[in-house]
Image: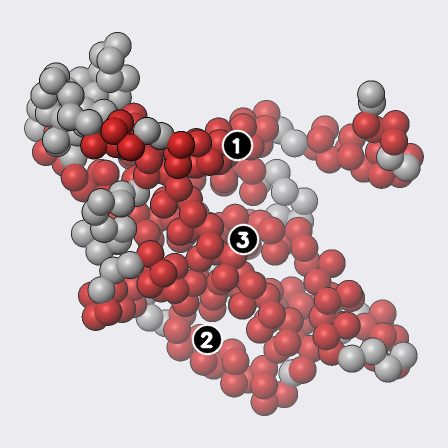
Amino acid sequence: MNTAALLPPAAAARRRKLLASWSRSGKLGLAVIAFWCLVALAAPFLPADALGEMSDAGVFQGMSVQHWLGTDYLGRDMLVRIVAGTPYTIGVALVATLIACAFGAVLGLLAAVAGGWLDQALSRFLDTLVSIPSKMLALVIVAGFGSSVPLLIAVAAVVYTPGSYRIIRSLAVNINAMDYITVARARGERRPYIMRREILPNILGPLLADMGLRFVYALRLLASLSFLGLGVQPPMADWGSLVRENLGALPMGGVSVLGPSLAIATLTIAITLVIDNLPGHTDADRETH
């Protein structure tokens, strides 16, 4: 059955126009993201024996029929290790991004609509957080309170909420000056209605683009912390910790350190390609980290 025939003519036309506007690189990026999401969903179903099974081939072995990505520093299959680390890598970064963007959007909309002292107070406080280097702030918090998955999520959310706030507020301030917002206020609409029904739908495209960029930033931050030994702790593992564990393979030309590195690179590049094809995306969104 042709699903387009079930849509209203205008909706079907918009759908065809949207699909046609996507470049090949955008569709490729979407396919790569879908692949890693499927890997993350399939990872919990890996046999428990496969996660800790040590191969007879030895440590830091190259690619073979039995081990497509070689073995790690303990002789375990690297492909299995990368699959097992995918949920932690994507899950932690995704939850942190959603929290950061949700808080940033709510505070940005509230500051734009309310204005006055509330806008000034929120802007000055979050500008103070922006002035602190993100990695330094994350290192101080994690080193002081220890590393755990909830803390890593909280750290990444705190680090990237100010950037999301600045983007949303700048967009919402422009829309808040429009005539239809003035009409909504004249009708007696309250702030929550104006934020949710009048402003938010008109900034949804840039909001989604910014959310994708925040995910990339959070992924890089968490991978950096794991590489320094302050991220996801054993027996759990993410891609950053897999890179750190297998650095010993570099002198002998082993591929075990390349697998998780390529996984990080492919996912971040794919997200960037998809963002470039989103409606409402502008290069200015990249300026605020």
Which residue is painted at 52% across and 80% down in the image?
Answer: 122
The Cα atoms of the two marked residues, 2 and 1, are separated by 34 Å
Q: Nearer the viewer, mark 1 or mark 3?
A: 1
**Type of the residue with mark 3:** Met
What is the quadrant of the C terminus in the image?
bottom left
Q: Considering only order in the chain, which callout, 3 or 1, is on the residue closer to the N terminus?
A: 1
Residue 249 image point, x, y percent = 12, 29
Mark 2: which amino acid? Answer: Leu
Of circles 2 and 1, the one toward us is 1
- Disc 2 designates what residue? 126
Q: Position of residue 18 (x, y in %)?
A: 73, 35
Q: Is residue 39 visible?
A: yes
At 36% from the left and 45% from the top, the residue drawn is 88
- Crowding near pointer 3: few (<14 within 10 Å), some, many (20+)? many
In this view, 222 is above or below 155: above
Alpha carbon of mark 3 to alpha carbon of mark 2: how far? 18 Å
**Residue drawn at (91%, 35%) of the image:** 9
Say which residue label 1 marks. 34
Which residue is the site of mark 3? 211
| In-image side of 173 versus 178 (left or right) | left
As measured in the structure, the alpha-carbon distance from the residue carrying label 1 to the one carrying label 3 is 17 Å
Indicate the quadrant containing the N terminus: top left, top right, bottom left or bottom right: top right
Crowding at dot 2, Cα within 10 Å, few <14 / some 14-19 / many 20+, comes out as some
For this rendering, which residue is in front, 188 or 83? 83
Task: Give the mark nearer the N terminus: 3 vs 2.
Answer: 2
Q: Nearer the viewer, residue 228 or 87?
A: 87
Q: Is residue 32 visible?
A: no
